[in-house]
Image (cartoon, grey):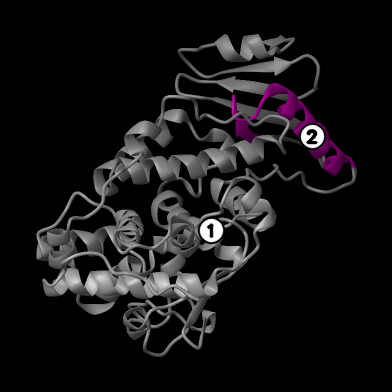
Amino acid sequence: MPQRQLTDRFCDNIKADQQIDYFDETVTGLALRVSPTKKAWIWLHTQDGKRKRLTFGTYPATSLASARAKVELMRGEVEAGRAPIAPKAETLHTICEEYLRRAKVRTKAERVRTLERLVYPTLGTRPIAEIRRSEIVRLLDGIEDASGPVMADRTLALIRKIMNWHATRSDDFRSPIVKGMARTKPKERARERTLTDDEITAIWRSCKGVFGRFVQFLLLTGARRGEAAQMERSELDKGDWTLPAARNKTKVDLVRPLSKPALDLVDGQGEWVFSTDGLTPISGFSKFKRAFDKASGVSDYTLHDLRRTARSLMSRAGVPSDHAEHCLGHVIGGVRGVYDRHEYYDEKQQAYEALAGIVERIVSGTQAGVVQLKRKR
């Protein structure tokens, strides 16, 4: 049983063709068990007159300093007459739950769905300190193959945020995520896509079922996908849809006076306006959209492109830029953004009616120009 002064450098570099225990001269009974496949911490101690061995943690997930500290805690349990219990490893799942509970996050429900669907089945039960970079890479490979590189990058961003948060609360944890793991570049993700009149017509005429109503609603309101998907019946009142500050990117309530065609799409019962089962909000957009693209014959666009298209159509319909920006929930910058607190309710109402009018003319084949808005006297 070799005994030596263990150091981080020694623990990093030591290798063995067979299992060898290297006992620490600093903490009695602590040893680093080195085998051809892994390095683990063990603690030999005496309790009730019997010699016992307890295995806990692996290196480098559990650092030398952490292993020494844990042994001292377990030694205290033995001296108190209690059986020592190896400290439980913190799994990625438990850390994610703690993060979601403590951190102030805007899209909590969406993050929970991403974790439950894409992350937990593969890495949820793994101790967070033992997760290797290669495991995350394999996870991202699978997501990219199934749902595309953008979804892989969104998942990576979420895991990175949680691991960085955990690192600020841990003495030993170091995130395995490094630069260069993303599958796309920000400039490549930036889009300028708007749909043509022919594409709008093809898509509109293919709209059926809940997802079809959802697509039409996005085009008639310019709402973000997540805003509309999480829309609750309680947010509707006399033709107005109030997006609460908690779900709004700008952290303020946003009132959207919906046009009649948009209101016709939110008829029905249940807590969620857009739901496939009446119990949960609509989800599974990638699956829905693949089938929808096949039916409409239009592809190479995202649901967010409908928001950009709606904004472009408002300009075509003669809607003033500021009014259109307020419809989309954008904050007006500069001095005007600080001092101009006018809610633009009437202007937004006219803008949405103009948007509905130009969409109706496009899909009916009667579009012949812009719509002149009525000016208030």
Between residue 101 and residue 39, name the one nearer to us: 101
Foreground mark, 2 or 1, reads 1
Residue 76 percent coordinates (x, y) = 87, 39
Kindly identify the residue that appears in the image at 34 percent across and 38 percent down.
Answer: 189
- Is the residue 17 above or below the residue 321 in the image? above
SS assignment for the magenta stretch, majority: helix
Three-letter amino acid code at disc 2? Thr
- The one nearer the camera, 80 or 168, is 168
Quarter location, residue 7: top right
The image position of residue 62, as x and y in percent, is 64, 30
Q: Which residue is mark 1?
A: 107
Say left or right for 58 vs 220: right
Above or below residue 174? Residue 106 is below
Q: Earlier in the sequence, mark 2 or mark 1?
A: 2
User: Which region of the structure is painted magenta?
Assistant: 55-79
Instruction: Find the distance from the CA under tag 2 to the CA under tag 1.
Output: 51 Å
Residue 217 visible in image: no
Report the front residue among 129 and 14. 129
Residue pictured at 62% horizontal, 63% vertical:
252
Give the vertical position of 74 relative to 268 (above or below).
above
Residue linked to disc 2: 46
Magenta-span inclusion, residue 376: no
Asked if residue 67 is among those painted magenta in the image, a careful observer would answer yes
Query: Whole-percent x and y of residue 204?
Result: 19, 70
